[in-house]
Image (tube, coloured by chain):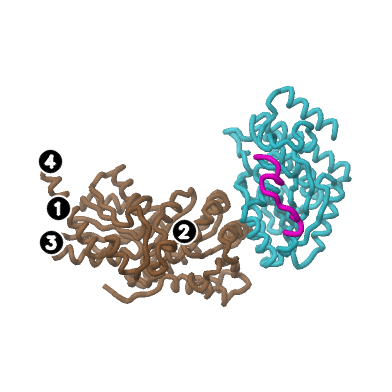
Amino acid sequence: MVLKDYTDEEIRRIAYDIRIKSVQMVYSANSGHPGGSLSVADILAVLYFREMNVDPEVIDQKYRDRFVMSKGHASPALYATLSMRGFFPTDLLTGFRKISSKLEGHVHYGVPGVEASTGSLGQGLGIGVGMAIASKLDSGSNRVYVIIGDGEIEEGSIWESFMAGSKYKLDNLIVILDRNGVQLDGFTDQIMPMPNLQDRIRSFGWNVIDIDGHDVSQITSAIEQAKKNTGKPTLIYARTIKGKGVSYMENNPKYHGSAPESEELFHKAISELEAAA
Amino acid sequence: MNIQRESLRDAYGEELARLGESDRDLVVLDSDLSSSTKTALFGRKFPDRFFNMGISEQSMVATSAGLALSGKRVFASTFAVFLMRAYEQLRQSICYNNVNAKFVVTHAGITVGEDGATHQIVEDIGIMSGLPNMSVVVPTDSVETKSVIRYLHDNTNTPFYVRLSREKFPVLNEPDYEFMTGKSTVFREGSDMTIIACGGMVSLSLEAAEILKTKGIDARVINMPSIKPIDRKAILKAAGETGRIVTAEEHSIYNGLGSRVAEITSESYPVPVSRIGMHDTFGKSGKGWELFDYFHMGVSDIARISEELFREESKYETVS
């Protein structure tokens, strides 16, 4: 199935549709993680509707691009994206976090299109390293994309994987850091400050590209630049807003892992997102 | 009894290097211990398919998951105690994704010897057995080790934990022996009681059975390499036919072979069971084989505890 060429504006609208569906899923489940889903929606829209070579009709083709959502709590955004891309019917999204559904609270391998279960932080990047090594062994031209969170990078295992990605010169590995500045307990600058973060990652042997993570054309050109880069892996430092598009969720740690508390707040979120779309 | 001793980890390294010749999708990882775990044999032969991840067990395990999810057959090694650092990677990236990755660890148990308690893990069988989708194997000799590695490579596609030791152990299996998951081997027939053992404790149990014979006690000795899944049938047969069971393992008496045997007998055919192993304690420095005596797990201890169980149970039987 060949994907049509979407314009930047169309991709942006798709991202808002991902946001709307994410908030609906979290509200319907009365639990889940809206903030970090809203922050990565534009990145997912660019990956799945423009950049990645995946085919819902032939899910298992060997040289498909791989995607790993290392911050597995952004499951609403990934499930919404996969369903919109045709991996499964969008009406199944209402099952999110419910007993009759495969749509587990955190990203689950049993869902069509999902490449790896994730949820405990700090592991998805290592999985991506393994996938990128496998691709090199097979002389595949496919790429591996991983989204990691900026709270998640407090895990030492992330830095172990940074070392490994550099050692094995994984220029087929493209990592996007969702730099939204908020984690469960508060602001990342207070919980565990990481000044000069880009320099730190660069010093581990990575190519680092700094962008606005809500700007479709910047996301696209960063990925295109990363694809041309050789000899080392790339990390796209995507400056994002946690809760992007819902005024009361933006930069509010409370909505890292809480659903809208009332029908009124839910409708407010949906109408704001629809207006922005 | 053949008393020739051979290294289990040498057997592992040799078998892995042999399998690598015909399987281009076989990849091997290690965490800076490849000269001790013997994965270096594979690494020298197939440098492109060998990945030394440095002293980064979490990275090694997560990377193993990614390789396996992309269709590679993965063997990863380090010392048993250090793999436990990556428990959660094993839980989520390996077992929850249910990938084809085998973790063959060495230097397990107290026979690590002089390195002492920090390196002598005695709780790993329990930790690994608790993981859904994970199977657990403890080979007793070099022949069994090769057979296990071959079997896992050829016949399985789920996660396994294979526990090897530093010490050389006596070769007990015949050269044509073939391992199967969930199957045990009767090494010595007997009708008065049964000693069920794994790993290095099997040869000690066979020696103990000879002592018991001089006291008129005819003990069956079973080698139980497959801890999960376990040979339930052989355990219940031993319970039914011999009425008393002693277990012997180089591991805590909690959550290992002894616990499994006690669970199975108490559920389906209750008989008295005595468990020999580490009693909720850390190890210590010393020569590997000295430590068996120090922790009351040596040949004379197995014979003594078995005899006690035998006499006690005879007494118990006369009451009814």
Find residue B161 and name its label: 2
Residue at position x 57%, y 77% in the image: B44
Of B203 and A166, the residue lying toward us: A166
> Start and end of the magenta stretch?
A185-200
Q: Amino acid at mark 2?
A: Tyr
Of B51 and A200, the residue lying toward us: A200
Q: Amino acid at mark 3?
A: Gly
Q: Is residue A48 above or below residue B159?
A: above
Label 1 – label 4 distance at C-alpha:
15 Å
Q: Nearer the viewer, mark 2 or mark 1?
A: 1
Q: Which residue is mark 4?
A: B320
Find residue B142 and name its label: none
Label 2 – label 1 distance at C-alpha:
37 Å
Neighbour tally class for label 4: few under 14, some 14-19, many 20 plus, Cα within 10 Å: few
Among the two numbered marks 3 and 4 on one chain, the one whose residue lies closer to the N terminus? 3
Find residue B311 and name its label: 1
Residue B251 % position (x, y): 36, 58
Residue A105 picture quarter: top right
Q: Amino acid at mark 4?
A: Ser
Q: Nearer the viewer, mark 1 or mark 4?
A: 1
Q: Which residue is mark 3?
A: B216
Marks 1 and 3 share the same chain: yes
Among the two numbered marks 1 and 3 on one chain, the one whose residue lies closer to the N terminus? 3
Q: Nearer the viewer, mark 1 or mark 3?
A: 1
